[in-house]
Image: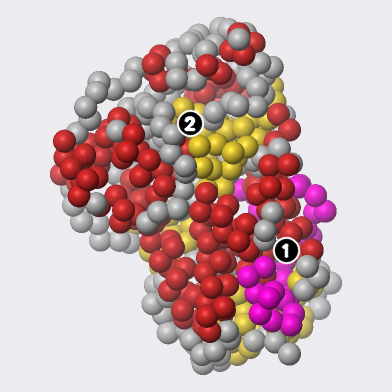
Amino acid sequence: MTTALVLGGGLAGMAAAAALAPHVDTVIVVESDRLPAGPEPRRGLPQAHHNHVLMAGGAKALDALLPGTTARLYEAGAHHRKIGRFLLLGPDVWSRCSDGDAFAITCSRHLVDHTVRSQALAGGKVELIDGTKVIGLVGDQSRVTGARVEAEDGAVRVIRADLVVDATGSRSKATQWLTDLRVGPVKEDLLDTGLAYVGRTYEQPAGFGADFPGVLIQARPGSGPEAAGGALMPQEDGRWIVALMGPRGNHPPTDEAEFLAFARAMRHSVIGDLLAEARPVTPMRSARGLANRRRHFDRARMPEGFLALGDAVMILSPNFGTGMAVAAMGALALRTQLERSGFGPGLARRVQKAVAGIGAGPWQMAITNDRWFPGVETNLKLSGGDGQRKFGVRFAKVIADNPAVARRMQDISALVAPLSTMMSPSMMFAVMRGPQRPPLTAAEAIGQFPQLASVRPGAAPGRLPEPADAAQ
């Protein structure tokens, strides 16, 4: 009788349980929180109150693991958005709309987790033990054979398993647990921009409709209001969720008036202008300490019977929106390896290498962008200098101007194509040639969206016209 033990009952844990269920007799999921019955908050996932998107690569992985997951999300009010149809102000210029296939699903993190959890538990093969925390691994340097867990009443017991999967997220103690077994060390990469976030949910004003596109103002490396960014995305139940972000010295405030002023002081006031007419339905919630962090379990001498997935392996700044997708794709990689070789020797090592490969592109994109923030803290040896940065600026301008390049970059961002596809001769030629049209003005960029016809560039506080006109 084979047993798999999954540590953590969030998205990564439930996706891993779905991957394991066809290949074992029992899957046990241990979760420290008491999990809610519906799409509701839980204490151990404070980031769920902030903006989330499920990129296409992750959506496809979840449907492969748990057929019908995205259909259930859409039925519950989630939105399907083409990445090329967001109103996007990049680091330097506004983007032209393009019609590629890459998409993101926008809805609350609570809804995604509830939907995945319900699907994973529905088959009857996954046992959930919540209200129980993991306090260590059982085994030795050669093999992990289970985990020690502690119930809410303080009772400690050992759960034995043929495979243990750490999906406990960004606060994973896996490196310490492995050290206790005299395994390691596990090398960790770190790049911290010092960005902080403040998020809030609003009731969407009348007149904007279900086709509200979503608005992105990318944080630009620098300091002060010019470096701030924000995202405003549609949610289920006729709501918007906003995330404002800023670097050290210009963190978003949580004061009511200052919050709106911060939104309007960014490189364009469109997010602040929209929020001025929307009714807030949640408190403002701040988040800090969101550094880019990657643990190289794939390079360590790991014991058999143990592997890590999701945020336990890699965390990226929420600015990139890839966390849920990378976790789901990692779980699908686990299923692929089980289908190929079952529980034979080397399973965990092969899965860990596949997970590292999935994260390599998103990691490279994140550090390539974030390394230029002033005061960045890192243990990486970063090569390149002004020349590399100027090339990056040129690259971004071409993406904003050239539909073919934009579509390729959208596929990469949505995790349906590897980063290497941007290095083709045709793509490199387009970048070297540079943009072929004048950059869009703010009015031209906003004018691509009839839904936003009521937004005026630089509108004064309280002067946003009635949005009902946009539906005409």
Quarter holding the C terminus is: top right
Q: Which residues are magenta?
A: 18-47
Task: Please name the residue shown 52% across and 12% down the image.
Answer: 453
Residue on which the image places disc 1:
120
Question: Does the CB distance between marks 2 and 1 fall below 8 Å?
Answer: no
Residue 423, can we see it? yes
Q: Amino acid at mark 1?
A: Ala
Above or below 439: residue 323: below
Q: Is residue 112 above or below residue 395?
A: below
Residue 285 appears in the picture as rendered? no
Residue 110 location (% of width, % of height) = 70, 47
Name the residue beneath numbered marker 2.
86
Neighbour tally class for label 1: few under 14, some 14-19, many 20 plus, Cα within 10 Å:
many
Q: Is 276 in front, or is 443?
A: 443
Sequence-wise first label, 2 or 1? 2
Residue sitting at 51 percent across and 58 percent down? 326
